[in-house]
Amino acid sequence: MTTSTLRQRLRAFSLVEVLAAVSIIGIIAFLAIPNIVAIKQDSERNLAISRAEAVNMAIVSYIQANGKANVAPGWSALNDQQRYALLIPYLSFAPANLTEFIPNGYSVTLPTNLNALTKSVLTDTSTATVMAY
């Protein structure tokens, strides 16, 4: 065997080295994936809270623009989607449906009475619990 062919054979990784590298990558992935899932869930929760706050601000802007005496009487007769349709001009980049505005896994219920001016209710639909925000 010449020295050049011996050098070419010695440049390759052995099977043990490749298995060690793959197992290290597997361990790192095993540790990282739960954190990535938790980060995704936290970001969706934060987005839902942010969107609920945006709806609350839109309600206040709607009342200020149109007058409480003008909008309060007809507000209670509407459902959530109809109320949301009135608020779309006061929301940035809002889709036409309320269910598209709030992330999956969450729902928002708009206040039925504008005289009391309460916040909208944000619910985690996976656990059916009302979220405090």
Image (cartoon, rainbow, N blue to C red):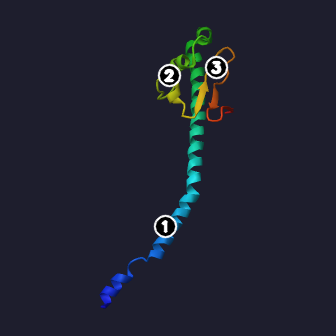
Q: Kindly identify which residue carries mark 1.
A: 22
Q: Which residue is at 46% across, 23% downward? A: 96
The Cα–Cα distance between marks 2 and 1, rounded to whole angstroms, is 51 Å
**Please, is residue 133 above or below residue 32 in the view?**
above
Left or right of 20: which side holds 112? right
| Numbered tag placed on residue 125 in the rendering | none
Q: Above or below — where is 118 with respect to 76?
A: below
The quarter in which the N terminus is drawn is bottom left
- The amino acid on which the numbered mark 1 sits, given as a three-letter code, is Val
Q: Pinpoint residue 42: horizontal percent, then vertical percent.
A: 60, 43
Left or right for 39, reference 17:
right
Earlier in the chain: of badge 3 and badge 2, it is 2
- In the picture, which quadrant includes the C terminus? top right
Could you tell which of marks 3 and 1 lies nearer the N-terminus? 1
The location of residue 40, given as percent across then percent down, is 56, 45
Quickly name the residue at label 3.
Answer: 111
Question: Which amino acid does the dot numbered 2 rest on?
Answer: Ile
Residue 40, relative to residue 116: is it above or below?
Answer: below
> Is residue 93 left or right of 131 when viewed as pictured?
left
Tell us which disc is closer to us: 3 or 2: 3
Q: Residue at x 69, y 16 (%)?
A: 116
Q: Which residue is mark 2?
A: 88
> Foreground: 38 or 91?
38
What secondary structure is marked by label 1?
A: helix
Numbered disc 3: secondary structure: loop
Q: Report which quarter residue 64 is drawn in.
A: top right
